[in-house]
Amino acid sequence: MTRTRLTAALAATALLAGLTACSGDDSSTASPSEDTASSDSTSEPVAADGAVDPDLEAAAGDPLEDSVYPHVGDPSVDALHYDLDLAWDPDGRTLTGEEELTFRSTGDADHVQLDLIPQLEVSAVEVDGEDAEFEHGGKNLLVSGDFVAGGQYELSIDYSGTPQPVEAPTTRADFSTTGFTVTEDGSAWTMQEPFGAYSWFAVNDQPSDKAFYDFTLRVPAPWTGIANGVMTSREEEAGQTVSEWHLDSKTSSYLVTVAFGDFAQTLDTTSESGVPITAWVPKGEPTKYAQNLEYTPEALSWVEGKLGPYPWSSLGVLVVDSDSGMETQTMITLGNTDYTTARDTIVHEIVHQWYGDRVTPDDWRDLWMSEGMAMYLQFVWQSETTGTPLEQLLTQAATFERQSRKVNGPPATYDPRTFGEIQVYYGPALMWDEIRRRVGDDAFWEMVRAWPSVDPDGSSNRDDYLPWIEEQTGTELSDLFDGWLFAKRSPKFVPAG
């Protein structure tokens, strides 16, 4: 997630939440109702019944309608695997896509719905190899068919156009749009949170719907296409660089990324625990942040010391022309600025590989579950590496949290128009420290390490998480949950000692 400076004197940083988006049609600018933003507002999951391909069974789940941003995503689709063949023309600013989506229908229906911006014109749709009727109005792609609950289907979509980023529902200064972003020289990159993947492919763009991904990326040589996971091949064909990428873990759509540009691989190493680590940087960029990128293996080792073995088969860092940065699954995408590529940012984004990626909130009301722990671990890292007392960092953070909560709402019931503001980071981080002091270091860190393994690669929410924390620690903590997550006014933070 993106970040800003807390203070120069303490060099404490706040990784403010990542990128957001709204569609280009009327629904994109409509303000969600007060009920939508309520902490009690949630959707019942669709039952996952019916057999699917055994190779894709791990991706079968219970997709939800989001309680904060219900106009994006649709629970009629349970995506299992996206195979994306994307060609980018930097001169014409044109993206051409051939998409194969394997999905499970969650109910008996005469159509399914996906998200796709209207600027990407759909030319053909097939369901199980047969031509299918479709409508593409606004951001909604409706595909007709005879869909049966629990049935598995292959959906093929051909599309082309000039992709546009989508509006971000936030008041933050470091970004105003999210999704597919094109720079002056025609290079392109994507970051999207809580949604925005639909600016470059047809998708069920909601975090509860995790799927597997494969990418084939085409761009004029010598440029290269970069994506999550592991590059399985890279060849030059008829003046184009064709790269193939495989992401071997199921992933929420906001955690996938692609980039097209003239990239150089500046890091190709292995961590102490044996994780392959790579870094990709635009050619000709100054090397002012190279030392920080080289810190990635050390940062990973530090985080593994707190959270246990790294959960994925690889880790990458991608630098793009942005003022923001965020984690994507197995890949950290950073803007090319000093603060965005700083070491504390890298630590924060690596923590997200456990908190946010391995276990993902199934609804955007629980963004705090990811950001609070990443922020707390960042503060701990800063204290350990700079010698600044943790209590000093947290006391200063409490001032900023209080101000943000007044304007943007409590961390767990924030104003949907202010996604990713500072209270979602600092409030739960302060809560974690109070929990640590109440239950003791041993019980606290055992709990922190255990949670990502409770439902590995899954999605969860506060209704499961909060009772689990109390059970795991053997301590009643409702006063801290209520105060730091839900109260309109911030609790008073009392530092240790």
Image: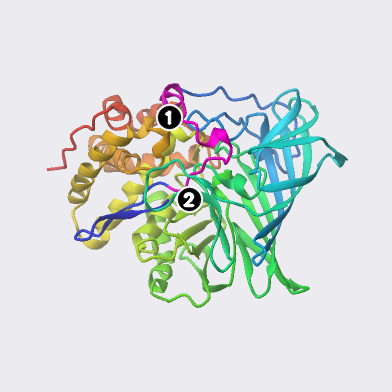
Q: Residues within 10 Å of mark 2 (few under 14, many from 20)?
A: many
In which image quadrant can residue 153 be found? top right
Q: Is residue 336 magenta?
A: no
Q: Is residue 469 above or below residue 97?
A: above
Q: Please tell me which of labels 1 and 2 falls first in the chain.
A: 2
Q: Give the secondary structure at mark 2.
A: loop
Residue on which the image places disc 2? 353
**Looking at the image, residue 163 lies above or below residue 219:** above
Q: Which residue is mark 1?
A: 462
Residue 46 pos. (x, y %): 63, 24
Judge left or right: residue 49 versus residue 450: right
Please determine whether, in this image, residue 63 is positioned above or below residue 276. Answer: above
Toward which corner of the image does residue 219 lie, by quadrant? bottom right
Q: Position of residue 173 (x, y in %)?
A: 36, 51
**Label 1 to label 2: alpha-carbon separation:** 19 Å
Magenta segment's dominant SS is: loop
Secondary structure under badge 1? helix
> How far from the left and from the top, in percent, is residue 493?
19, 37
Task: Assess whether residue 29 is covered by the magenta stretch.
Answer: yes
Instruction: State the residue lying farthest toward the left.
Output: 497
> Horizontal and vertical percent for residue 270?
51, 68
The amino acid type of the residue labelled 2 equals Gln
Magenta stretch in the rendered image = 18-40
Q: Name the residue located 19 percent from the left edge and 57 percent from the top edge.
A: 388
Q: Name the amino acid, label 1.
A: Arg
